Every structure is written in C-alpha cells, then in structure tokens.
Image (tube, helix red, strand yellow):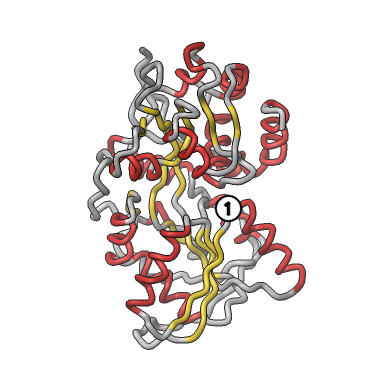
Amino acid sequence: MTSYPRRPLAAALAASLLGLMPQGVQAQGTSQPLTQSVSGRLVLYTSQLDADAQGTVDAFRARHPGVAVEWVRGGTSALIPRLRAEFAAGSPRADLLLIADSLTMETLKAENRLLRWADAPRGGVPAAHVDADGFYWGTKLITTGIARNARAPMPITAWADLADPRARGLATMPSPSVSGAALIHLYAIVQNPALGWGYLQRVAANGLSVRGGNGAVMQSVAGGEKAFGMIIDYLPIREAAKGAPVQFVFPAEGVSAITEPVAILAGTRNEAAAKAFVAFLLSREGQELAARQGFLPADPAIAPPAGFPDPETIRVMPLDPKRALAEAEDVQRRFAIMMGH
C-alpha cells in the first residue's frame, strides 16, 4: 500500500482552511465588555444537529439565564439563502451564525455582513482556528472520512478503496448542495493530486450515491442499506459507542476538515449577548461541552472524546480556499452532472 506522509491537524488547518482573502472596509463592532448580566433576546442560525443545538443553547443559558435564545436549524446550503433573502428584504433575523465551514464565513466577511471583534477572548483555541481579523472563530474540528458497516464485504483503509469492484453500489455520501462539510470535502478531493476528478469519476462509475445530509448517510450505513459512507467523524463514532454496527475510518490519503465557526452578524440587535455567546463557545467550559457532545474540541488542551485518536495523528488534505471559492460554481456543476443530478 502507498505510504502517505502525516500532516498534523493544527498545521494543516492553519495552512488550508483559514487562509485569508483580500478584504475591503469591514463592518466594525463597538467594544463592549462581557459581563454576567447580559440579557435580552438572541436568534441563532445553526447547522448543528437539533440535539447539539439545544444542548449548546441550554449550556449558554445556564451561564447567562437572562438571555432568551431562539435557534433555527438547517444545513448551511439552506441557511445561507434564507439569510440572503433576509438581507435583500432589509430585515435579517439572525444575531449569530454557527455553521460548518470557514469558506462561507469568508464570503460573508467580504460582503461586510459580519461584525468585527478583534479582541475576542479565545481561551485556549489556537490562532490557526480563528479569523485573524476577528470576524469568525472556529469552535471545534470536524473531519470527513469513511463510515463502514460491520458487515461490509471488505475492509477499508483509503479513499481509493471505494472504487474497488467489491464496493460497487455500496457507497454513499452527503450532497454538497445540502452539507457544508460535504462541499468542503468535494473541494479537498478535487484539489488533491492523488485523487482529483479522476477519482470522483471512478467512484461515480462504481455506483457512489449522493443523498441528503450526513444524517441520511449515517442511517443508510448503520441500517445496512450501504456498506460505506463518506461522512463527518462524530456521527459514526458517537453511534458506535451506543452499539451501532459501524466504525469510522481515517483514510490513508487524509481527511478533509472544517472548524464549525461562529460569527456575529453585523446587524445584531444584541451585541453584548452575542459576544457572550461567542466567548462561551471558545471558553474552557464551551470546549468541554464540545467534547461531551462528541466533537474534537478546537482547544488542544481539552481531551478528545472516547473513540477519537490523538489529533496530532490525523492527516488533513490541503485546501486552497481562494481556489475553492474561485472554482466553486464550476466544481459544483461538474459534480452534479457526473452524479446525474
């Protein structure tokens, strides 16, 4: 088997996911100290699963009981069009955005839609996981690898294995038009010289199916409808701990990764409470919450959940964000045609 060099997770994310793009004048936030007495109402748009979104809001409100939080859950590809329609109508509802990927945040940043908080307290979260200009902050690390059903007809160690004839018709993945993580994963594969469009063509010819979001892929693999699924790490790791017949594989060629960043919208009606929410997610308490929820925390000082390897052993595929944004429309169109969508 081909030997692939290891690329530590922190270094890879710093080089690939959080590269900055040239910006013009940005929306500025006023400096407001965080206190325990914040109150009022917040609206959070998030791509977290329902249980995680509710758990995050509950934990925040335990610290700040005077804040009422309404949360709206949807895939990034559904939330952003909704937000843009609200921008166009001049009445955005959201105060906060907690979504899958930094590329979407970069786009909103370039459009002056995010509030700048240059001195946000990030606790032990490394600088590599936050926007250097202070417009968004990574809250955790979520990789995309392969879920394998225990009854699969073959072992799997690499992305290339999904093109094996023994895996014909047995693999699935989330739709990049639904899942932000899947979209980042598509960009990473396209940019990987060892994979690229040739690899995607091979797995498409081998019967790779594209369906819904990561939850749909999880159900398909855990239920035995499919043997393999390209999927974000925490779902199969979490379900395996509950007894589901699945395992999560970190492929030899590497994984793609997102940081689930949080940002404050420039038009927030409750800046103090929004900042308190961001500070909570980045605090040790917030990072420990992420670990309890089954995620790799962004703060390397917080122990990862059971079932995860040492983060330093995880190899992340490089991603050039400028190239990804420049090629986004063509890549998505070509992929949809390839998969018959």
Q: Judge from the rendering whether residue 49 lies leftward or rightward of residue 59; answer left or right.
A: right
Q: Please, is residue 148 above or below residue 270 in the view?
A: above
Q: Judge from the rendering whether residue 62 lies leftward or rightward of residue 181; answer left or right.
A: left
Q: Nearer the viewer, residue 54 or 112?
A: 54
Q: Judge from the rendering whether residue 301 lies leftward or rightward of residue 176; answer left or right.
A: left
Q: Quadrant of residue 241?
A: top left
Residue at 61%, 40% in the rendered image: 176
Count of numbered badges drawn on the protein: 1
Residue at 36%, 84% in the rendered image: 35
In the displayed orientation, state which residue is furthest to the right: 89
Residue at 34%, 57% in the rendered image: 290
Q: Nearer the viewer, residue 262 or 121?
A: 262
Q: Please, is residue 313 above or below residue 138 in the view?
A: above
Q: Nearer the viewer, residue 114 or 28?
A: 114
Q: Position of residue 336 (x, y in %)?
A: 69, 33
Quadrant that contains the N terminus: top left
Q: Please, is residue 77 above or below residue 172 in the view?
A: below
Q: Judge from the rendering whether residue 136 lies leftward or rightward of residue 142; answer left or right.
A: right
Q: Quickly name the residue at label 1.
A: 75
Whether residue 311 is visible, yes or no, is no
* Amino acid under disc 1: Gly
Residue at 38%, 21% in the rendered image: 156
Q: Position of residue 162 (x, y in %)?
A: 49, 20
Q: Please, is residue 173 above or below residue 208 in the view?
A: below
Q: Position of residue 222 (x, y in %)?
A: 42, 35
Whether residue 8 is visible, yes or no, is yes
Q: Quadrant of residue 206?
A: top right
The crowd level at tag 1 (other Cα within 10 Å; few <14, some 14-19, many 20+) is many
SS class, disc 1? loop
Q: Position of residue 120 (x, y in %)?
A: 41, 70
Quadrant that contains the C terminus: top right
